[in-house]
Amino acid sequence: MKFLLNKKNAVILIFLLALASGFFWNHRAYFKGINTGGDEVYYNAIATDILTRHTYTEDGQPTYVEPLYPFFLAAIFWPTNHNIDAVKFVQLFIFGLTAVLIYLLARSIFGEKIGLVAGILSAAFYGLANFTGVLYRENLLVFLCVLMVYSLNRGSREKRSRFFVISGIMLGLMTLLSSTMQFLFIFIIAGFFILFKKQLPLKSIIWKASLFFFAFMLTLSPWLIRNKIKEAETGLAIVPRTGSILSVRTYLMDRLYPEIHKYFLGHIAGYYFAEKIYPDIEMKAFRKYWAVNSRENQLRDEGHDIYQINEIMTKESVKKIIEEPHKYVLISLLAFVDFNNPIVPQRIFNGNESAYFTFAEGRFPQIPWPVKAGLLVSLRLAWITVFFLIIYAIVKNWKNFGRLGWMFLVIVYFNAFYSAVHGLPRYATPIYPFYIILAVAGGAAVWSKYFIKKQPQ
């Protein structure tokens, strides 16, 4: 144990474990190119156009995907002759660095033992390791998010302004990777005034918050200037997709509301139980957005450009949300449950990556139903226990909120934003490291309070 509690040894162990875990969970994905369909195809197409056409397009056509990941791919493709596996190995290395950062963050907040356990669990956890072998942006987004929080936490602890500059740059890069991050700066700036209120004079707080915001905007500025020159209609948005995203929400309001109780049962207990109770349930209705695509195509056929389509669909969606707020609230609650559902290994669970579909749709007919029911209940109880420990850790440390304040603000933002807009389980991966850290801290607190006998004085 003393060997592992040595910082250098722990860093090496966690880094190597992350490399082994990332390769283990994705070993079939290496040396086989990319999967057909889905995000990988258009990320690859945009990166290819960057290198061959020297344009930010998808197969020569305009695209409105956030720029950082395609440029990340292009930067690796250029010296490796478009080697897909080079990307996967770079992402594997990034995952190793992420696991080490999680260890260092947890160690700085809760101490060596909790940091070590959190680092090891993060390195081994499928939900994080899964994205090293596919051309998805989540692997890079998790790294940037953890580095941002680590920088904020270290800057708060050491009162050194350069870490706030680094955190601003990280948030800028996160926003160029996923435009859903563009409002997180509001939470972070609020955090400066909340966390430093009793520690620093107001001028110093404003100065540090300004440094963060300046670094954030400076990182975004090249892309915003490019948009202003080439596509002035975009304004300050990274990509014009607000309308289509909100349209998904309003479509689901109409599609799911009449049978919303069925979908809550499926999301919470699992669709294996939901289809037993409601045989007519259309389990994947909340994943079908064809009506939204049809509306976009209709407006395009009428001669509207992408900016006009975005504006029209945004106005239509906002109007509907205002007219039917009860539907919006219920679908937002469902999205919150969806967002916080665990990710499971697809190959083990027969093509299913969301825990609530486990054993549903006739999967694994050879397994007796009592065994399926027992496994599903056990999985749900384990996940509920994790969230109980997270909440317990937050409550236990509330008086020392400054220790975990930055993590807490990021967790709140992700949950609030994706619940309000559109939540999927994989969108939660950037905050999985913070869930793991808090769950380990909560578990240690429960163990210390209820299972360790105190020595009589």
Image: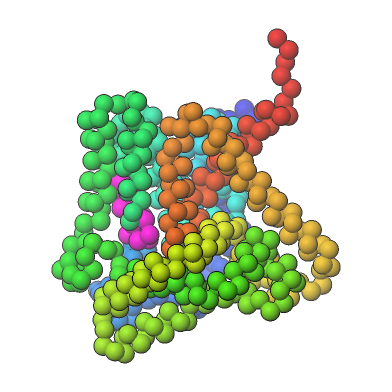
Residue 30 located within the stretch drawn in magenta:
no
Magenta region, residue range? 167-181
**Residue 214 at x, y percent in the picture:** 22, 46
Please determine whether, in this image, residue 387 is positioned above or below residue 74: above
Q: Quadrant of the C terminus?
A: top right
Q: Which residue is painted at 42% across and 40% down in the image?
A: 406
**Residue 349 at x, y percent in the picture:** 68, 67
Residue 180 located within the stretch drawn in magenta:
yes
Q: Quadrant of the N terminus?
A: top right
Q: Is residue 282 left or right of residue 415?
A: right
**Residue 128 at x, y percent in the picture:** 54, 54
Please determine whether, in this image, residue 206 is positioned above or below residue 316: above
User: Is residue 343 or residue 34 the one in the foreground?
Assistant: 343
Please determine whether, in this image, residue 117 is positioned above or below residue 321: above
**Residue 443 in view here:** yes
| Quarter occupied by residue 53 | bottom left
Q: Which residue is painted at 36% across and 71% down in the image?
A: 319
**Residue 232 at x, y percent in the picture:** 18, 70
Residue furthest out toward the left = 229
Q: Is residue 55 left or right of residue 108?
A: left
